[in-house]
Amino acid sequence: MGEARIGRVVVVGAGQAGGEAVQRLRALDHDLEITLIGEEPLAPYQRPPLSKKFLAGELDAARLLLRPPEVYEQERIALLTGRRAVWIDRAGKRVRLDGGQELPYDALILATGSRPRKLPLAGADLAGVHLLRTAADVDAIRPRFVAGAKLVVVGAGYIGLEVAAVARQLGLEVTVIEAAVRPLARVTSPEVAGFYLDEHTAKGVRFALNAQVAVIKGTERVRAVGMADGTEIPADIVIAGIGIISETALATQCGLAVEGGIVVDRQMRTSDPAIFAIGDCVRRPLVHFNDRLGPLESVHNAIEGAKIAAAVILGKEPPPEEAPWFWSDQYDLKLQIAGQFQGYDKLVLRGNPKERAFAAFYFQAGRLIAVDAVNRPAEYLGAKQLIQRGKSVAPEILADLSKPMKEIVAAA
Amino acid sequence: MPKVTYIEHDGKEHVVDAPVGQTVMEAAVKNAIPGIDADCGGACACATCHVYVDEAWAGKTGESSGMEQSMLDFANDVEETSRLSCQIKITEELDGLIVRMPKSQH
């Protein structure tokens, strides 16, 4: 902002991005008036464990929280939970909440996140049919998420496969239905997808690939999933993980530029210089990928956006962007991803998938653009550093396991 | 409840109550200790919770796992007693633990 002194910042959305933003703002400015508005009843919490340890019952609600609720009061951050922002008056620089209260701002941060796609099918509202986005969703799922129950997962993305892994570990019968011909079709290569298909199959997960759900059957509660080919899959629980949609209603209402998500520049500024947007709801330039506008549905994106926006609003130097990163835990497999694999023309494997520890490096026109590393953290961090530095390494060098990753990166 | 002392790279000390069963990283994040970001929340995926365990305590915090060691290989300013604080579980035995944060995480 620079010119005018910033005294009041309002953050709309109390997820990981919003929670991180208020913490950064307070760390940078002792006197700033900070308000954080969230629709959920909880203080900001981590979403990644929802489909992993929280679903498995290995992490309780208190540990899910980013920080204890009392911290907000101690740091004089007004945390308004269970409240919705319904209107933005850009000319008057005010946000109106449900109930009519209006909050003036000098700078506004939209961290409105995303919502999961619903199954566009008859029966999708039956009891036992769930989406998985919030702690409340998991609380609703868990009572019947027990050994012997029949679970049908619709969508074989990361959420769906993580849920399937937890379910098998707890002894549920699991079928995963996917419209594409392979799992993880949107997010990784056929090679890595094939590895995960084999792992889940070996653990007893059944897959229906290239398959369309036609209807959810049951009276009050779900009883079965009806497929387009007429077959039926019995189900006590259905969980759909079929993608997310950026929450852009407020941005659209007040006339900000929106293209699938709220369009921001490298400083997380929207088309209104007093309004910033961060996290799942944005499309931001990916600096390591020719400034292509990207949705990044990740913790990395949420936290980095928060750090940048807080610094820019308060006239500080923002941190440099990291290469996009992400992870997925399934069984004892830790998948760590850096970069963006879309558009790759060459894939190189380092290590053998049969040993359950390998990395897939993705190249485009000779340039390293991404890595999927399974139980191979050095390959993940090494590739991430290379992508950040704009460096590349010849595919045959990366394929040579006799050279440690650290040496390869140091020599690049 | 065990107490853990976190020392910033510039010498500033923070003493916090750390519940048994949580990790050294969690106790830091929940008390907003500068220098421990822990972006991934303890999934051993980001290496932003790197600490130096005080020499006197290095024997009690246990060994780092292969995965943790590989992550540390790529962290900055790694020393003999470097650990990822998300991989150190608080026990009664660790009451009084002292860890320092590297300058690069400032």
Image (tube, rainbow, N blue to C red):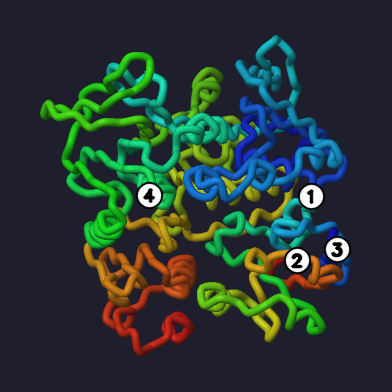
The quarter of the rendered structure image containing the N terminus of chain B is: bottom right
Relative image position of residue A280 (x, y in whole percent): 50, 39
Work out how far the residue at label 2 is from the one at label 3, CA to CA, in angstroms: 10 Å
| Residue A94 in which image quadrant | top right
Work out how far the residue at label 2 is from the one at label 1, CA to CA, in angstroms: 30 Å
**Residue extending furthest front?**
A148
Nearest to N terminus: mark 2 or mark 3 = 3
How many numbered discs? 4
Nearest to N terminus: mark 4 or mark 1 = 1
Q: Nearer the viewer, residue A321 or A199?
A: A199
Q: Which residue is mark 1?
A: A27
Q: In the image, are marks 4 and 2 on the same chain?
A: no
Write down the chain letter for disc 2: B
Residue B3, numbered circle: 3
Q: Which residue is mark 4?
A: A168
- Determine whether A29 is above or below A113 in the image: below
Secondary structure at badge 3 equals strand
Question: Which residue shows up at 39% across the image and 55% down it?
Answer: A290
Q: In the image, are marks 2 and 3 on the same chain?
A: yes
* Marks 4,2: beta carbons within 8 A: no
